[in-house]
Amino acid sequence: MKIINKTKNSVLAENIIFRRSFFELMSGLIPYKIKNRYLYDIFKTHKFNKKDAMVFKVRYYEAIHTLFMSFSISIVLTDRNLRVIEKSRMKPFTFYIPKKSYSYLIEMIGSKFSKVDIGDELLFIH
């Protein structure tokens, strides 16, 4: 499954990791690594690369954190129609409190930040 930026006619991610269970929602990208940057990264079994994105269907307004992560990410918040309403870059061990309520949270490698703007329409396609 892919994430397409319909507004800019570009691919944001070629592999979507959906988070559904309570444990998956709580852990997010914590079990993932790009490379062994911190000592605790040797215990992480999953790789996350530039073609990946993690998608959370959010049930309520919540803060976002990057505790115990070893790489920076771009977060994109969308409404239920997948229109971008907010975005931010996050470094490891930081918190972000969204200004608006949102329906989907998309986490990607930090370099993807410039490929999406507020108001862009996104699509999930097979």
Image: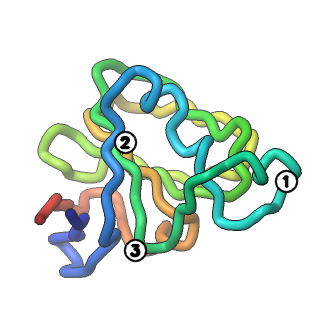
Task: Determine the residue positioned at 76% across, 51% down.
Answer: 41
Report which quarter residue 5 is drawn in.
bottom left
- Indicate the amino acid at tag 2: Leu
- State the mark number for residue 105: 2
Mark 3 → mark 2, Cα distance in angstroms: 16 Å
In this view, the residue in front, 32 or 75, is 32
- State the mark number for residue 118: none
Return the x and y of residue 81 as percentages of the image width and height: 12, 45
- The residue beneath circle 1 is 38
Return the x and y of residue 76 as percentages of the image width and height: 40, 51
Secondary structure state at the residue bearing disc 1: loop
Q: Marks 3 and 1: in contact by CB < 8 Å? A: no
Mark 2 vs mark 1, foreground winner is 1
| 98 left or right, relative to 82 | right
Mark 1 → mark 3, Cα distance in angstroms: 28 Å
Report the quarter where the N terminus lies.
Answer: bottom left
Q: Earlier in the sequence, mark 2 or mark 1?
A: 1
- The residue beneath circle 3 is 115
- Indicate the amino acid at tag 1: Tyr
Q: Marks 2 and 3: in contact by CB < 8 Å? A: no
Task: Determine the residue positioned at 61% across, 52% down.
Answer: 45
| 30 left or right, relative to 54 | right
- Indicate the amino acid at tag 3: Lys
Task: Determine the residue positioned at 44% across, 31% down.
Answer: 24
Return the x and y of residue 39 as percentages of the image width and height: 88, 50
Q: Earlier in the sequence, mark 1 or mark 3?
A: 1
Q: Earlier in the sequence, mark 3 or mark 2?
A: 2
Mark 1 vs mark 3, foreground winner is 1
